Structures are given as C-alpha cells and as structure tokens.
Image (cartoon, grey):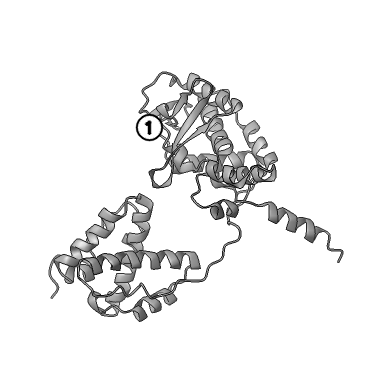
Amino acid sequence: MQPKDIIVVPDELADRPDAEHPVPGLVASAGPSARFAWEEFVYGKIRNAHTRRNYKHAVVRFLAWCEQRRIDLIRIAPANVGQYLDSLDLSPATKNLHLAALRHFFDQLVTRHVVILNPAASVRGERLQVVEGKTPEITAQQARKLLRSIDVSHVIGMRDRAIIAILIYTAARVGAVAKLRRGDYYDCSDQFCLRFTEKGTKSREIPVRHDLQQFVASYLRASGLEHSEKARPLFRTAVRRTKELTTNGMSAGDMARMVKRRMRDAGLPSRLSPHSFRVATITDLLSQGVPLEDVQHLAGHADPRTTRLYDRRQRRVTRNIVERISI
C-alpha cells in the first residue's frame, strides 16, 4: 500500500496552467531529498510563469509514463528518456522542450544526491532547422484596412484602435501590451514613450510615433484615464455591450480575442493573429534597409537569428519565381 502523500498526477491535470499539482508519486516515494529537488526545480529555479508551466507539465508527463512501467526514479536510464521521447506524437521543437525540462529536473536531482547521473544529459534532441517562422504575416494594406474599419465614435473603438496600433508600430508582443500600466505611457520632454515588460522581465522603452500618440491620447481622454494613478491598467475591459469600461485590465487573451474579432469584421483572413503584426513590422523595416541590429533591438530579441525568422522577404521572392512558371 502506498503512503498517503504519494499522489499520481493525471496528465489532464498537468496540462492545466492554473492547477496547483501535488508532488508526483515517483518523486514522493524517492524521499525528502527528491521532494526538495522537485520543489526547488519548479518554484525556485524557474521564475518565468510560462516556462514553469511548460517544464512542470513535461516532467509530470514523463514521470507518469515511468510510473506506468514501474520504473523507479533512481532507476531511470537514458534509454527510458529516449524511448519516451520517441513515443511522443509531437513536433521536434516540442520534443526538445520536453528534453530540456527533463535535463533541468534531473540536474536538480543530481545536485541533491537523489540520483548519481543525469539520464537525460546524454540523450540527443531532435534535429531542427528553422529558416522561417510559422506566424502568418499581415500585409501593410491589410493593417491599414483594419485600422480604418474600427468605429472610433466611442471609447471601446478608441481603445481597440490604440491597442492594434501599438502592436503595429512597436512590434511588441500582445502579452507585453496587456501588462502596460498608465505610468508606462509618459512624456520624455521631446516625445512620448511606452515602457514594455517583455519576456524574462526585460524592460524596454520604445518611442511613440505621432499618429500612435494621437490614438493613445484620444483613448485616454475618452476613458477619463489621462490623470489616473500610474499603477492602474492602461487598457481596461468593457461591460459587455454597454461601451463602458470597467476598472479591470485586459489580459493577453482578451486582446487576442479582440484582434481576431476586429479582423473578422474587417473581412481579413482568420489565420492572422496579433503576432502577425510583429512579423509585418520586422519585415517592413528590413525591406527598407534598416540594419538588422536596429530591428533586433526594437523586437527585443537577444539573438539576431530570431529576428531573421520573422523576415518574410525571401517568401515574397519565391512567390515571384513560381508565378513565372509557364506550364
């Protein structure tokens, strides 16, 4: 009979980002050091909420796989890790994410003397060569059409126009826009700026161009937020269809759904998303000859190779070539 504190976490629970999972059964049965290493791995070493959720899910899923095969934590070998990865019906990138999570987890077990060697360290990841990102690009004409289609006779329209314009003219991620507070839009004496909190708590200041400044200013006047407290959310949710704002800030999901709805109303393709603006902005700047380093800084990428994944100029050349086929 198992001790009471040994709880097997179902895979469907591990997939829930908001669930507080108990310690996996294999970890609990391995003793206090293993439990300490688990809590250190999940809550101590990983500070980014998205990474914590993904790594935690990957490890819980692997441990459940091992438990079904009656493989104890200290008996897990590289062959088990390799077999597990082979059994996953996932993309190469996702498999590599699972492998990275397992490597980090077993590193903690080695540090706390639960296991002698890291069984995931010698397992090779999937070969993955990404030349171009998968996010569809919105064209300049489509972006202008979208902005023009928004009814700005009320505060909700002004809010939505300001959000979409920020996505276009700053290349910011929708998650960073959702984190904006009233104090993150400010006067720098010679221009207005927006301060974004990006991945890994990185903070970036981006100047606001004149038309975007007018959009944000119109929204602030209409919403009565011009002189509100700096800690208040910059963009707030609406009270159903009343065209009135609440005191609650919009989440990234709220903004993504709003953008999808506005795109549908404008007759734009359903495959486009808020991230499409980021692709379009980066491609547009590179097409104008703006140095890659400057575009990389605007996008907030640590590696210029990441910025190149957003560059769709090569795809345009390919289209021109295939159109010339005379068959």
Residue 280, placed above or below residue 73: above
In this orientation, which residue lies closer to the viewer: 134 or 262? 134
In this orientation, which residue lies closer to the viewer: 135 or 44? 44
- Image quadrant where residue 171 sits: top right
In this orientation, which residue lies closer to the viewer: 270 or 298? 298
Q: Residue at x 69, y 52 (%)?
A: 313
- Image quadrant where residue 9 sits: bottom left
In the rendered structure, the answer to whether residue 312 lies left or right of residue 185 reads right
Q: Which residue in the protein does label 1 denote?
A: 248
Residue 147, placed above or below residue 305: above
Tell me residue 37's x, y (percent).
Answer: 22, 63
Q: Residue at x 52, y 39 (%)?
A: 258
Kind of residue at badge 1: Asn
Q: Residue at x 37, y 55 (%)?
A: 51
In the rendered structure, the answer to whether residue 170 lies left or right of residue 77 reads right
Tell me residue 257's x, y (percent).
Answer: 50, 43
Classify mark 1: residues with Cα within 10 Å, few (<14), some (14-19) or many (20+): few
In the rendered structure, the answer to whether residue 201 lies left or right of residue 287 reads left
